[in-house]
Image (spheres, rainbow, N blue to C red):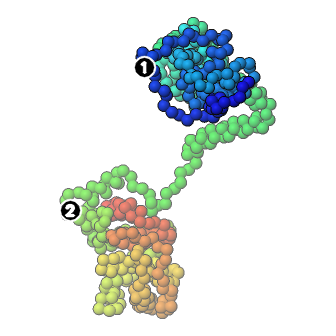
Amino acid sequence: MGALTDSRKRLTADHRLPIPSFPPPSPPPPSKRPKLAPFPSSLDPSTSASPPPNPSPQIIHGAAAAASTSNTPGPSSSSIPACSPLPNRRRLPPPPPFKRPIHGPQRVLRAFRFDGPARPHAAGPSWSSPPAPPPRSLGLEQYVELVSSVSHPAPPTPTTIPDAAREKEAVPLEVVAIEEDGDDRKQQDDEEVVRGSVVVRRVPLYKELYEASSRKRDAKLKTLEFEVRLAEEGRLGLERLAEVLPRISPKEEVPEPFVPLTDEDEEIVREALHGRNSRERLAVHEPSNIVITREILQCLNNQEWLNDEVINLYLDLLKERELRQPSKFLRCHFFNTFFYKKLISGGYDYKAVRRWTTKRKLGYSLIECDKIFVPIHKEVHWCLAVINIKDKKFQYLDSLGSMDMKVLRILARYFVDEVKDKSGQQIDALSWKQEGVTNLPLQENGWDCGMFMLKYIDFYSRNMDLIFGQKHMRYFRKRTAKEILNLRAE
């Protein structure tokens, strides 16, 4: 080997160091264009080792690294003369790339309502395309999807889902078998449709058999079934008893003050209260000389105030009822609505009412009575005062719940004077208890005070508790009208 010259040093350095990019040399003029060199032979080591013309810095750098690390025999870079220019040779074409697979229309397999893997056409795969994956079998997810589609089907169509499946779509089903219909496969628009029949069971057969055998051997279940049958028979027996009981048991008696009116009585009362001729005489009470016309009786219509004629006639009818059945009612005296006004006219005046209670007129003395009823009229409101001789007390009843002690003191003074005048006895009635009756049935409007007062008198004369209320007032108005028309209190 000779000495390493500058040219060789520079060439060696060019192979080892990256060469900065510079514009490629201009091509030679057309007149001096060299001829094309023959295609280098792969067997000629001198030509195979020569680099291509105008190499890029990266290619030169890579070739230098390969030459430095390669162990294969061949001419080194030192064998190329430093002063001789690189020969211009024809560029070799790049190696052909790997062929890409042909993307053509593909056919999608639709079985059991899921999309399977895409399969290429049967045109034959390319030598460089990867092999197509094998068709996947029905996996767990597809099986669950299949079962779900059977248990919860899509909106029904006339050909796929019957009405029974739509009604019981919420019931969990068990897929027992899938029977394929053989050649019943149809291909439309490059899609495969698999038609088959699915045999399903709501409950597995083994569960049905197990539950049936358990019910036969379960003693508690037998006991419960017996109790259910016994309760059912008892219920049927009670229903039959409810049908027969009204026939064998007496009907509950309605208290006499609440006996309903018959249809005939309802019609008579309706005609009397709503007739056209207001001056028609409907009832004439000869003992008291009271004439009841339709105009007077119409105060018993709903929302009307009671007048003196109706109240006084009804009190006379109550006295006649007592005389008819003395053992059934208390012995009472009923003052009319004018008594208290006469007694207090111009102050207390016993002489104004002294003749009202003679024994010749009444047939009895007031001292012989159990109770004495005194109607109290306060301008637009009716109240009741009771001289309770049986219990030795004076009572005041107001359907509005008020109290007037002045009325009770006046009646106490009157009763002392009355007993002294008629029998000559001196009683200490001023020491009797004077009270306002509590727990009274009260009125809930502004026109039923007179009817409440009459019913206080009616129930006390029967020796009954005051068990009525505002809801009975319509009935009491009709019943009072009926009794006045018949001139008979019941």
Question: Which x, y percent locates residue 32?
Answer: 45, 16
In the rendered structure, the answer to whether residue 262 lies left or right of residue 193 reads left
Q: Identify the residue shown where x is 62% and y is 17%.
A: 130
Which of the pair 19/186 is nearer the observer? 19
Question: Which x, y percent locates residue 202?
Answer: 64, 26
Query: Relative to residue 327, is residue 277 depicted above or below?
Result: above
Q: Amino acid at mark 2?
A: Ser
Q: Quadrant of residue 487?
A: bottom left
User: Are the two marked residues, 1 and 2, in contact with CB atoms closer than 8 angstroms?
Assistant: no
Q: Identify the residue shown where x is 67% and y is 10%.
A: 43
Q: Amino acid at mark 1?
A: Pro
Q: Residues within 10 Å of mark 2 (few under 14, many from 20)?
A: some
Mark positioned earlier in the residue sequence (1 or 2): 1
Residue 113 in view of the camera: no
Residue highlighted by disc 1: 29
Residue 459 in view of the camera: yes
In the rendered structure, the answer to whether residue 116 lies left or right of residue 456 reads right
Labelled disc at residue 278 = 2
Query: Relative to residue 46, is residue 402 depicted above or below?
Result: below
Q: Nearer the viewer, mark 1 or mark 2?
A: 1
Q: Quadrant of residue 360?
A: bottom left
Question: Which x, y percent locates residue 167?
Answer: 53, 28
Q: Residues within 10 Å of mark 1 (few under 14, many from 20)?
A: few
In the rendered structure, the answer to whether residue 280 lies left or right of residue 399 reads left
Question: Which x, y percent locates residue 237?
Answer: 64, 39
Q: Identify the residue shown where x is 55% and y is 35%.
A: 20
Which of the pair 198/485 is nearer the observer? 198
Which of the pair 175/319 is nearer the observer? 175
> Which quarter of the rendering shows the N terminus?
top right
